[in-house]
Structure formats: structure tokens, C-alpha cells
Image (cartoon, rainbow, N blue to C red):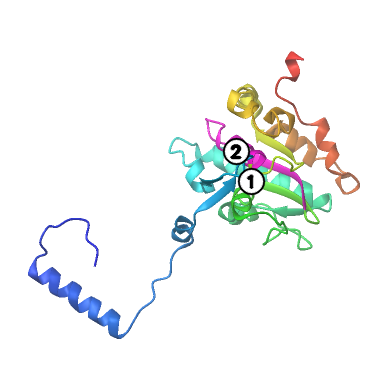
Amino acid sequence: MVRGNLRRFEEEDGNWIESYLKRQLSTPRRFPLSESDSRKLVTLTVKTQESKEVEVSVPTKEEQEFSPASDKEEVRESIRVQAMLSRIGERMNLKIWLPKSDRQRVLSVWKPENDSLLTILPLNYDDTTLGTIENIDVLWIKGRSIVRAFEVEHTTSIYSGILRMADLMALQPNLAINAHIVAPADRREKVFQEILRPVFTLLPKGPLRESCTFISYEEVKNLSLEKRLEYMNDKVLDEYQERAGDLDD
């Protein structure tokens, strides 16, 4: 038995522990690990360009986005936007992926049709990459490829989604993916400021701004009102996105 300190047990406590351990020895009882506990036991590693293996962590969506100051109405609005993005992708005949932590809340707004919502990602990447991809707010999938990836930001920091996109680009520099940060229009400049930070400009693949753009909540709503989405493809998003630095070019 391993103890955290050498303080002496009270005799009654010691007797209880001893009897419990004896019962466990004679009639073992399983105590399954939670999903969170299981993740903590797994060491995730990646190889650097110099083929050196290094340990990394992939925060869960809940760990990365915990914000006591988040306004409940903002959170509800972000769920509605996730639902709109899901519906738009579905109407374009694409498959949809939602993080497990958000799925039930989004499904209270969006009712998938024709098995459009995926329960397993049809992607062949290492565990570290998959752990990052699984936490992205909305994915549009075609076959075994990610067509578009969306992070819907509702926290004041506008940071967790950008970090997740940057993690993905760092893990898979050869992955051609169109990524988008979706947030209210009044946070556009904040998103651009973060995307243009040096840490996101010096990624192996190149500056994050080249593969990750901004789409406002309002533009998502406008796109959702298009009556001919079934006849469009994902490239229509190019008309609704904004790229950090474009105003200065």
C-alpha cells in the first residue's frame, strides 16, 4: 500500500482499510477508469523534423475552454452557430463531425438527416492528431478528407480555437485544410490579432493566416439562408471569409 504521508492511522481507520483490502482480495471488484482518467494514462508523443520523439499534451475541449466569466447567452449562441454550420454542410451533402462534449447540445437545435452526423472519424492519423481533430467544433467531411474545419469562439479570449487549429497545422504540416475561426463580427480584430502573433506565424507549414480565416456569426447566418445550398459546394465559403492582414495588403 502506498501512502502520501507517514502520519499514523487511527486504529479504527486502519482496521477498516485492512478489512476492505481483504474483501477486495477474496472477491475482487472492478473500478473502471473514466474516459478522462484513461487519457491521463496515455503518453502522447510526436516526432520533430529532426526525428526526435517528444512528449506533447492535447487538452480536452472542456479543459481548454473553461471560463467562469463566459456569458450563458454567448454559449447558447455559439451552439446555435455550430448547428447552423452543421446544417449548411449537411445541405451540401457533406458528413458532419461534432465533438462529443457538444453533440447533445447541438443536436437539440439541429436534427441530422440521412446519417449525416458521423460517430467515428474516417481518418487515418496518429492518436495525437486525432485527439486534436476530435475536439474541433465542426468538421465537414467528404470521404476520408476534411473539407472544412470550424472553431466557434464564444470566450472573450478568442484563443482556444486558434490554438487547436495551430496544433493541427503543427502536427500535420502537409495537411491541406481550410480552417475557420467563427466569432461575432465585433471580435474580428481580436481574432486577427491572435492569428498574427509570432507563434502562429512561424509554424512549419507557414503562417496560420494562410490556412485559417475568420467568418462572422452574421455571415454564417446569411449563408444559411441561401436557398440553393444543395447545388453549391464548400468553395462558396470563400465569399464569406476574411483573412488576417488582407486590409493591410
Residue 137 tag number: 1
Q: Secondary structure at mark 1?
A: loop
| Quadrant placement of the N terminus | bottom left
Relative to 90, 205 lies left or right: left
Q: Is residue 228 magenta?
A: no
**Mark 2: secondary structure:** helix
Pick the residue in front: 199 or 96: 199
Residue 8, how many percent across, how many down? Answer: 10, 61
Q: Nearer the viewer, residue 60 or 219?
A: 60
- Apparent side of residue 28 relative to residue 58 in the rendered image (left or right): left
The residue range painted magenta reads 145-170
Q: What residue is rendered at 70% in x and 34% in y? A: 205
Q: Is residue 207 above or below residue 151?
A: above
- Nearer the observer, 17 or 86: 17
The residue at the point 14 percent across, 70 percent down is 14
Going by the picture, which residue comes out furthest to the top?
A: 248
Identity, as a three-letter code, of the amino acid under mark 2: Gly
- Rendered location of residue 28, percent (x, y): 34, 81
Spot occupied by residue 217 in the image (x, y as percentages of width and height): 68, 34
Count of numbered marks:
2
Q: Residue 161 shows which numbered tag?
A: 2
